[in-house]
Image (cartoon, rainbow, N blue to C red):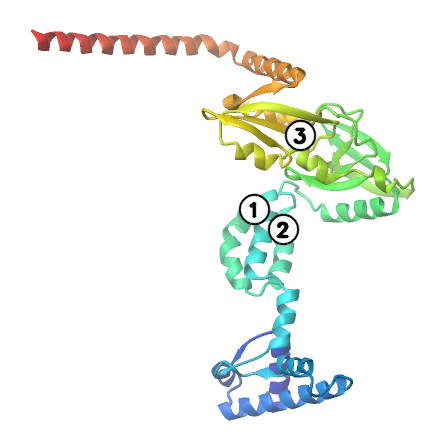
Amino acid sequence: MNSQERVLSIFINLLHGQKLKKKELEEEFGVSGKSIQRDMEIIDKVIDKKLTENLGNMNYYSQKYDDTVAKSLINRDVRGTYFIESAIERKEHSHFSKTEALVLLDMIMSTRGLSNVEVNQLSQKILSLSTDSNSVKKFIQNELYHYKGVPSNSIVDKISTLMTAIENGLIISFDYKKLFQKKHFEFTPDMLFYSDMYFYISSSNHLYSQTRDDMENLTKFRVNNMDNLTVLGQGKKRDYNDRFQVGVMRNQTGAFAYFGKEIKVVIDFYHEPAYVLDRFPNSRLLWTKNGVSRIEIISNDGEGIKLWLSMQGDMLKIISPVYLKNWLVENLQKTLSYYQNSLPLEEKRREEKRREEKRREEKRREEKRRELL
């Protein structure tokens, strides 16, 4: 490599926001320290000339001029290290810090919403925009290696098609799989959103309280279950005020995205109240007494709140509305019926346990009687 190629290589690295060490440059190019210093002087002269041309309208004696020049020339404040401050500032604004890159990648992988191939591609892009990709790799390499996305095939192309249809009010056509059935649909999608491992689109009927097994009146569709997706043509654009508000539904339903009309649910919670308050950001702690917290949740009457309530076991009691309390009782009774055949065996085990405890108690009494004698 000749001197011109060396200067150009150093200049490019400086413009990319790198901090270059004099000793490392000497070893890389096999030249003396004086040669590196001359290279830096050449680069400074070029920068200074371009600054004079570009900043001609700026007052030569102004503080802004001085600051611009200081940030644009090679900084030598740190002994044996060269960098251009303005290039580093540009890099900081256009790149992720190692912490930001780690946060993004960890959140993406935790959703499992993309295929393995897509997560690997996205990870490489984010790492390439990180100020310290090697450091980030150490934190994510195990999780990335074991990552198992829910979609088996790519869904990013489908999402791109759906975004175009939503933005332009286009009608889409697709086959949809659910509950071991397949059904064909054609409509203008309303919105695209993510919830609990899946990307969804909503239909225009987003106020309809859909049940889990209602194939005829679906209002939301998992993107990874859509096959033969095509765009048919122009549909009817929805008024902005009638749009589906993803943020409202997310706050009302937590992890389970179901549509419905707004309701208030009051519960007694027998565990850490933050578990409820964090999941439903519009909820309100009414009081806490003897380890029990009464909480008011702003939710909707869709299936999402029912799914969440039924998962809490003995950690909560529904106070209102009454119909929701009755639903949960019936649901628990139905669940219990699945285990009726195993109840006699459980009862036998409990009886054996009671007998064993009785024998131990009798033995303790006999030993105590002997001691008194």
On-image quarter of the C terminus: top left
Check the image and report above or below for 303 versus 228. above
Looking at the image, residue 84 sits to the left or right of residue 347; the answer is right
Which quadrant, please, contains the N terminus?
A: bottom right
* Residue named by callout 2: 119
Question: Residue 369 appears at what percent x and percent y?
Answer: 13, 7
Q: Where is residue 352 shown, x and y percent of the image? A: 33, 9
- The residue that appears at 74% across and 27% down in the rendered structure is 260
Instruction: Answer few, some or many: residues within 10 Å of disc 1's Cα (few below 14, many 20 plus, some between 14 and 19).
Output: some
| Disc on the earlier residue, 1 or 2 | 2
Local crowd size for mark 2, using a 10 Å CA cut-off: few (<14), some (14–19), many (≥20): many
Residue placed under numbered mark 1 in the picture: 147
Where 272 falls versus 156 (above or below)?
A: above
Mark nearer the N terminus (1 vs 3):
1
**Is label 1 in contact with label 2 (beta carbons under 8 Å)?**
yes
Above or below, comparing residue 177 to residue 95 in the picture: above
Q: Quadrant of residue 187?
A: top right
Secondary structure at badge 2 equals helix
The number of callouts visible is: 3
Q: Spatial distance from mark 1 to mark 3, Cα to Cα?
A: 35 Å
What kind of residue is marked 2? Val
Q: Quadrant of residue 360?
A: top left
Mark 1 touches mark 3? (CB < 8 Å)? no
